[in-house]
Image (cartoon, rainbow, N blue to C red):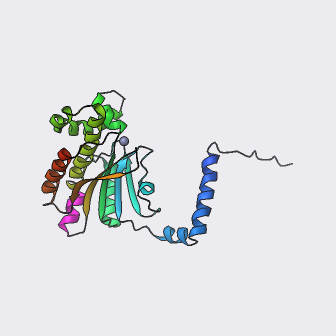
Amino acid sequence: MTEEKPIVTSPLQDLLDSNLRWSAMVRRDDPQFFERLAKQQSPKYLWIGCSDSRVPATQIVDLPPGEIFVQRNVANVVSHSDLNCLSAMQFAVDILKVEHIIIVGHYGCGGVQAVLDERRLGLVDNWLRHVGDVAQKHSGVLQALQPMALRNARLCELNAIEQVVNTCHTTVVMDAWERGQKLAVHAWCYSLDDGHMHDLNMHVDSREALHPAHDQALRQLTRLPATPA
Ligand code: ZN
């Protein structure tokens, strides 16, 4: 007599069921979708954003799977010693030949707020020191802003802009420009309140364009009212 195997129900069954419904829906709208996508990905964009669950890449710019290569971490940091981010960037630029790298911050970012509050959260504090460095660099601008929500908004914007500078200084981006590859780096900040993306006027498409673009983005920021979270 053979023993019947118990049927194990996954504790994540609701997600698996949802996935089945989604794949059926996609196939209904476009029967060749998965067949096409399985063969090749050719995204034009690399998205470097915050890990925050409310800021999913393809969904908020209304693009289907296959259109954006994504790297996310707490507070959308580009650190020169982060092999994970640099490897994703190198693959995206050298192999996939993305044409745009978009650094996407978001207003009300908890990582940014932890820096402003000087709150101790644990290991992540070491990671957030990168945002702390941005806050220190722009402390004059930030200290003049009240209430705290405005300060948070401005630091979210400044952080995205400064991470563009870090991105442009990577060997990956420098080498791409050196060999004449078409590549631009941009800063955005997303509003959780209304789902709108804010362009931070930071667009860099060459080594020479970096400093003028940085100066211009900072000038534009001082003219615009910071958007409260
Ligand atoms: Zn965040």
Residue 16 on the magenta segment? no
| Pick the front one: 56 or 72 | 56
Q: Position of residue 187 (x, y in %)?
A: 27, 53
Who's the residue at 63% across and 42% down the image? 11
Q: Write down the quadrant of residue 182 in the picture.
A: bottom left
Q: Position of residue 184 (x, y in %)?
A: 25, 62
Give, as a single range, the part of the protein colored magenta.
169-180
| Pick the front one: 96 or 149 | 149
| Pick the front one: 4 or 79 | 79
Q: Position of 32 compared to 109: left or right? A: right
Furthest residue in direction right, as rendered: 1
Residue 61 vertical placement versus 53 (above, below): below
Quadrant of the rendered image holding ligand 1: top left
Q: Position of 124 compared to 39: left or right? A: left
Quadrant position of the C terminus in the picture? top left
Who's the residue at 43% across and 51% down the image? 56
Q: Position of residue 222 (x, y in %)?
A: 18, 44
| Pick the front one: 193 or 164 | 193
Residue 187 vertical placement versus 33 (above, below): above
Q: Position of residue 77 (x, y in %)?
A: 30, 45
Q: Position of 2 compared to 222: left or right? A: right
Give the mark count. Answer: 0
Q: Which is the main secondary structure of the residues drawn in magenta?
A: helix
